Amino acid sequence: MPFAKKPQVFSASINELTLGTGDKATTLGGQNVYNLYSFDAPIANRPKIGIDVSDEPDEPSPGLTAFYAGCTTLAEKAKKAASLEDVDFVCIRFASADPNGADKSVEDCVADAKAVAEVVDKPIVVAGCKNTSKDSDIFSKVSEALQGRNILVLSAREEDYKAVAAGAGMAYGQKVGAESAVDINLAKQLNVLITQMGVDGKNIAMNVGSAAAGYGFEYVVSTLERVKAAALSQNDTTLQMPIITPVGTETWGVKEATASVEDAPEWGDQEERGIDMEVETAAACLAYGSDAVILKHPESIKTIAQLIAALM
Amino acid sequence: MALKGLDIFKLTPKTNCKDCGNPTCMAFAMKVAQGAIPIEKCPHMSPEALATLSEATAPPMKSFKIGEHSLGGETVLSRHEKTLVSKTLYAVNVCDCMDAAKQDEVIASIPKVDYERISERMYVEMVYVNHSADKSADDYVALINKVKGLGRPLVLGCTDVAVAKAAVAAAAGCDFILNGADESNYADMSAVAKEAKVLLGVRAASLEALHDTVEKLEAAGNKDLILDVGAASIKDAYANAVQIRRAALKDGDRTFGYPSIVNVAALSDGNAHLEAALLSLFTCKYGSIVVCSEMTYAKALPLYGLRQNIFTDPQKPMKVTPGIYPINGADENSPCCLTVDFALTYFLVSGELERSKVPVNLLISDASGMSVLTAWAAGKFSSSSIKKFMDEFDIAGKIKNRALIIPGKVAVMKGEIQDKLPDWSVIVAPNEAVQLVKYMRDEEWKKSYVEKAPAAAGAAAPAAEAAPAPKKVMPAPPIVVNGPYKLEDKVVTYQGHDPASKKFVVIGERIHCISPAIRKAMDTYDEGPILKRAAEQIAAGATYLDVNIGPAESNGPELMQWAVQLLQQNFNNVPLALDTANKAAIEAGIKVYNRTNGKPIVNSADAGSRIDNINLAAANDAIVIALCSADGIAKDNDERMHHCHNMLERGLALGMESDDLWFDPLFLVVKGMQDKQMDVLNAIKAFSDEGLKSTGGLSNNSNGMPKHIRPIMDSALVAMCMMQGLTSAIVNPCDLRLMETIKSCDVFKNNTLYADSYLEI
């Protein structure tokens, strides 16, 4: 029997979610096939790449330090990051707001965000310090300051979704990221809760959990695959939000990326190890279901952009 | 893929001749579909029909061996559906078009990446030896002879038949694949491969042409193939890799049911980072052999970790090899942190310890790959298993520091461990790994450190007095029976149980040492809380009571005898399930057990390390709960039934009645394993069809759900299970909704006669 292609095209599709405004706006999702399966049907919007810019002064590798050389403020770093051609959006991260760390004030975070918005015209994503009460405060104040810029806040979690959804999503019309830790049932539940509060499901993106390759990444794989399968094959509207996966923050923290050449001479150049860890993890996330990845290193960004372009 | 009865019926002669012993062809076909009789029973099936049938029952993807590695044999597209069985193999490309120096450089680089990660050797498994059209057969043979020295299986990439013949001769003596058939040369190339008895790689300009070529090769009798997805472009290669695998596994197209080979060296065009991305992409989907230009540690470290994650069996925990793992340059003078061998626990704990920057020896003890609390409850992480580990690995001989920091979650074991390891100062760490950074960095652990005087130095050292006194083993007190037991002024009596009754057997699970109140009561032989829980369950309609005393290492036999007599004497010889990893305790319990209302139940045996509990049950004429799993959850019902039959066979050989083995399919949690729930239900049906009894911890399905949801889920599941033939369950009888459902189902199943008051009796 001759081979007959059987494209796997679904009647359901992933929601389209647009971030930013004007001609630099970027749209995530929209496809009615599994990720990267452009041979099944044209992909509405190619997967997107964000760059992670932290407000902490230290960078995890010499290459990154060199890249941001001369930048003294978050705005300068963000401007430099946004200048990379392959970057679709800029994710500013207020890591130093952590009350157990530098405890930067919410006002200073807002001032930083405003300064970033003045020099960056690409879409802005705002990430916090992982302290839920501080984060929800930062998110609503930054959302207020950046009203009209159509930003995304990362993220609303089980512990703080009410404050984040009310502040960022409902009061100021920004996009809301729903974050759960590799648990498909919780991912769904969180979307239900946020929409029950009055946020339109079309304004939600999901971060369903992240890990570096080799570090329990199987849970990320299965969560991504199962979320996309439920969204497309079961037409589960509570899981049709596009998935945005922070990769760089995970991969630049494991020893394969951080060990110095002195510590692990047989492993070779640290920069290369960090880049490949980021690139390989990102490629796997895209293969299994992420609609956007957030990376740190310019070389990783260039490589993943090449990969995506080659597959579209 | 199993054929349905109607599909088989279409292939029968439809003459209703009865030669097979069945009244009609339809009846015959239905039985064949169930596997009840073989198709050969029909003498009139046409050869074509038989071929169709054997084709339909063949696995969807062929599996092969190359050296010690397996290729193919996948049955699912995603790991969560079942498990992926043949991990991606990596090869490095070397070509006769390279100059000799470059060839040598590549060959020399191949063995450089070689390390171990979670008990798995990580290295370049194969070498791809490519022939370029402008080179001679001699050039190619010379290269093969050089590469052979590496002692790894080869892939010979060569489409020239004459050169291939010479290459095959040169490669004789090593394992190899001949990747060289295409649309024009397939017949001759197939002959070369068949003569050498090796796998033949096939390529073509399009998927359609590839399909045609494979069909022609199969028609000519060659089914030892591997499919090259091509290197026209990244997009094409990816489309082909996915569509080939999907056609085979999802659409049942066996022509594409072969492993694949992907050459990312050719696709990445010298871009090392892009090659890394492609290695990852094709490991995810769906390269069986992936060829790259060079394997560096930078590429390998994430790649092999990724592969290890993807190809682990989702039903089996990833385990770390037990031993000493020095962290932050720890030496013999650094303190020890002890935990279990569950890979996630290891990564979490080692990661946090690394972040603390404090030198510490991480001790990983064997706990069957379970997390700390689960291992503790199952008796796999106990003071004796820890003692055994410390002795086996000679920790005291290798490490001078005597601080032994144990996980906060098992603080309860501190005394027992201290008793067994008197030379060590046992210290309890915080509950969560994240708290370890501060705990270690601020040296909080030192506050609990007790200096141990060397044994010979005598008792003079003052610090020794501060050591916790060894835990005293209290002798069991006499059994207390204070007349009829009253619960809120109502007398609770056990109504009795007829073992021959068909009614659903409810085994009450509430006397369990994981409950703090019960644990405390058992520690102090305080009968009050235990009798109260027993009375509540009996009043609610429990048939049996489960008595879980935990590992009870110091006083198991005494404690179990006390508990058995206490419960039976107070409640009209209520039958009991004796639940502990401590065999001596079970035997002792049975010695004093009264059988008026039914045999004792041994909870539980499995098809793995606990299979001996079947012998224990047989020797003591007890019922045994037989868990259909060995090492982790069974991956499918074939495996469940395999375990079931193994245990059944063992029980029968030991003289047990089949009714005394109650098979437990192992109920799975919905939050996490929703897609496996029907498997469990079908396993119950399979037990029932074979006339076997079944039971299990049914409420595990609703673990992690909100309190108000659990009774709803549990009731729905018990109704479905009883429909499938479940005969018993280990549940909380105080769940009213659940008990009402069970009683109602017993009415529908005609196990008990209906009366308006059926819920009250």
Image: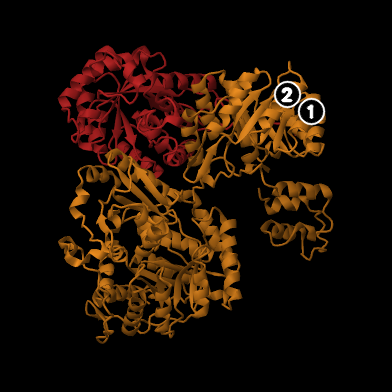
Residue at 78% in and 37% down: B196
Chain A drawn in what color? red
Q: Nearer the viewer, residue B509 or B19?
A: B509
Mark 2 in CB contact with mark 1 (< 8 angstroms): yes
How far apart, in angstroms, are the residues tagged by discs 2 and 1? Answer: 9 Å
Chain of the residue that carries numbered disc 2 in the rendered image: B
Q: Position of residue B169 (x, y in %)?
A: 78, 32
A147 in relation to B44, above or below = above
Question: Residue B300, relative to residue B265: is it above or below?
Answer: below
Q: Is A276 in front, or is A266?
A: A266
Label placed on residue B140:
2
Residue denoted by label 1: B166
Q: Residue at x 82, y 47 (%)?
A: B48
Q: Amino acid at mark 2?
A: Tyr
| Mark found first going from the N terminus, 2 or 1 | 2
Residue type at mark 1 is Ala
Confirm whether residue B655 shows in the render. yes
Q: Identify the colour of chain B in the image.
A: orange
Find residue B731 and report its horizontal and vertical position in percent.
39, 66
Q: Circle 1 marks a residue in which chain? A: B
Q: Secondary structure at mark 1?
A: helix
- In the rendered image, which quarter contains the C terminus of chain B? bottom left
Task: Name the residue nearer the viewer: B198 or B185.
Answer: B198
